[in-house]
C-alpha cells in the first residue's frame, strides 16, 4: 500500500505511549501508563468504566473517523483518476488516579505525574512524523481538554481525564473507481 491505514497509525500511537516513562520526585523511573489500549469509539464507555476501577494511570487510543480531500491536477480531465488525501482523527485519553486528592490527580505530585503532565507527554510523542519509512504520516494535535468520568450510578466525584484529538495526514493516493 502507498498510504498508512488508520489501524497502522493507531498502533503506532499505542507503541509510542507504551514506551513513555515518568520519573518521580525520588528519582525512580517507571512506565508512564500501566495500561495503553486501542479502542473503537463505539465501546469507549465500556473501556472507561473498566479502566477507572482497575488502573492507576492509563491511556486509550480511539479512532474517531477520517476526512478525505480530493486532489485534482490543474489539467484534470475525466480520463484521469483523482487523488485523495486522508486525514485520520485519533483521540488519546489519559488519566491519573490519586485517592483523596482530585487536584493532585490533575496537576501531579511527588509520587504521580498528574493528568495534565500525562497529556503533555502524549502530545510530545504522538506529534510530528510517525514513521521513519515510507509511506509517511504526519500528526498534529488539534484540541485538548480536561474532563471527568464517573462510575455508573455514583454520586461521588469522578476521575479526571485529559483528552487530545490528533489529526494525522497521510500521503495522497489515487482513487480508483
Image: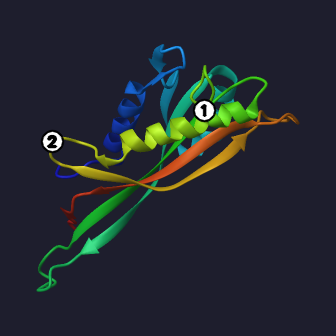
In this view, the residue farthest toward the right is 155
Mark 1, Cα crowd under 10 Å, few <14 / some 14-19 / many 20+, is many
Task: Please name the residue shown 15% across and 41% down the image.
Answer: 133
Q: Quadrant of residue 114?
A: top right
Q: Residue at x 52, y 33 (%)?
A: 59
* Residue 177, horizontal then vertical, whole percent: 23, 68
Residue located at (20% from left, 78% from top):
72
Q: Which residue is mark 1?
A: 114
Q: Is residue 80 above or below residue 123?
A: below
In the image, residue 171 above or below residue 25: below
Residue 110 can be seen, yes or no: yes
- Give percent across and percent down for residue 103: 72, 35
**Secondary structure under the numbered disc 2 in the rendered image:** loop
Left/right placement of residue 106 relative to residue 7 reads right
> Which numbered dot is residue 132?
none
Judge by depth and name the residue closer to the eye, 30 or 89: 30
- Residue furthest to the front in view is 26
Corner quadrant of residue 157: top right
Q: Which residue is mark 2?
A: 133
Residue 153, image quadrant = top right
The one nearer the camera, 50 or 109, is 109
Amino acid at each position: 500500500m502507498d498510504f498508512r491505514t488508520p489501524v497502522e497509525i493507531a498502533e503506532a500511537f499505542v507503541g509510542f505511549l507504551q514506551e513513555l516513562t515518568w520519573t518521580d520526585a525520588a528519582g525512580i523511573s517507571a512506565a508512564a501508563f500501566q495500561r495503553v489500549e486501542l479502542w473503537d469509539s463505539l465501546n469507549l464507555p465500556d473501556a472507561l468504566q473498566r479502566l477507572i476501577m482497575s488502573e492507576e494511570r492509563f491511556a486509550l487510543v480511539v479512532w474517531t473517523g477520517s476526512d478525505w480531500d480530493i486532489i485534482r491536477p490543474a489539467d484534470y480531465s475525466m480520463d484521469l483518476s483523482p487523488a485523495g488525501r486522508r486525514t485520520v482523527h485519533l483521540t488519546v485519553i489519559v488519566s491519573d488516579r490519586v485517592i483523596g486528592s482530585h487536584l493532585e490527580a490533575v496537576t501531579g505530585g511527588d509520587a504521580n505525574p498528574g493528568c495534565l503532565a500525562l497529556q503533555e507527554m502524549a502530545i510530545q510523542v504522538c506529534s510530528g512524523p510517525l514513521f521513519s519509512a515510507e509511506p509517511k504520516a504526519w500528526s498534529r494535535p488539534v484540541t485538548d481538554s480536561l474532563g471527568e468520568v464517573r462510575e455508573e450510578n455514583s454520586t461521588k466525584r469522578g476521575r479526571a481525564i485529559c483528552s487530545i484529538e490528533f489529526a494525522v495526514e497521510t500521503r495522497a493516493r489515487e482513487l480508483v473507481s
